[in-house]
């Protein structure tokens, strides 16, 4: 099934992002992200899908070869330099967005699937 949707990015970090969409996506589904500040298209996998009543919060894990500051955040937070490091075993994520702790549960937002060092929260000081 091919489709395209303009969605709102809610949260970003070097390993992935959270986007708000009008429809749910299956965990593990490969998606292509276009319109990034880096000027290229990148691939990710759905890591989680959480209902927000009238929309869905979709967690996307970037494919391992594409992690980094593809979002154009300058200056990037200090902890974003860990993008090229291996995540700790307890929170390891493969390119399909699968955690070593097991698959994400329905309606659970697994922040730890992206980074053990925290998330980027726009507007937070």
Image (cartoon, rainbow, N blue to C red):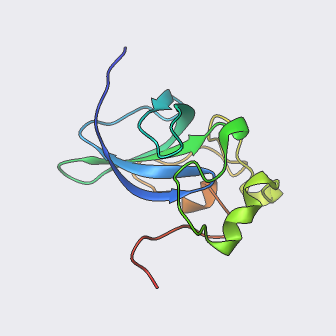
**Residue at screen point 73% across, 48% down:** 100
Task: Tell me if residue 111 comes above or below residue 23 in the rendering.
Answer: below
Residue situated furthest top in the rendering: 1
Instruction: Please identify the quadrant where the N terminus is shown.
Output: top left
Q: Nearer the viewer, residue 66 or 100?
A: 66
Q: Nearer the viewer, residue 97 or 67?
A: 67
Position of 35 compared to 71: left or right? left
* Residue 92 left/right relative to 55: right
Residue at figure coordinates x 58%, y 69% from the top left: 75
Residue at horizontal 42 percent and vertical 70 percent from the top? 122
Q: Residue furthest bottom?
A: 125
User: Viewer-proximal residue, 90 or 43?
Assistant: 43
Where residue 83 sits, quadrant-wise, is bottom right
Q: Residue at x 81, y 60 (%)?
A: 88
> Residue 64 location in percent, x, y?
71, 39
Left or right: residue 43 versus residue 86 is: left
From this view, report whether residue 77 is shown above or below residue 24: below
Q: Residue 51: give x, y in percent of width and height.
A: 30, 49
Left/right of residue 99 with respect to residue 70 in the rendered view:
right
Residue 77 image offset from top left, x and y in percent:
62, 71
Q: Quadrant of residue 4?
A: top left
Tell me how many marks there are. Answer: 0
């Amino acid at each position: 099934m091919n489709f395209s949707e303009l969605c709102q990015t809610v949260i970003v970090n070097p390993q992935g992002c959270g986007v708000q969409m009008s429809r749910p996506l299956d965990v593990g589904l490969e998606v292509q992200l276009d319109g990034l500040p880096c000027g290229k298209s990148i691939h990710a996998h759905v890591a989680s899908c959480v209902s927000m009543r009238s929309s869905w919060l979709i967690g996307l894990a970037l494919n391992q070869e594409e992690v980094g500051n593809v979002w154009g955040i300058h200056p990037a937070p200090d902890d974003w330099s860990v993008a090229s490091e291996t995540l700790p075993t307890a929170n390891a994520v493969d390119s399909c967005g699968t955690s070593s702790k097991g698959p994400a549960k329905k309606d659970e937002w697994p922040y730890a699937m992206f980074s053990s060092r925290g998330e980027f929260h726009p507007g937070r000081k």
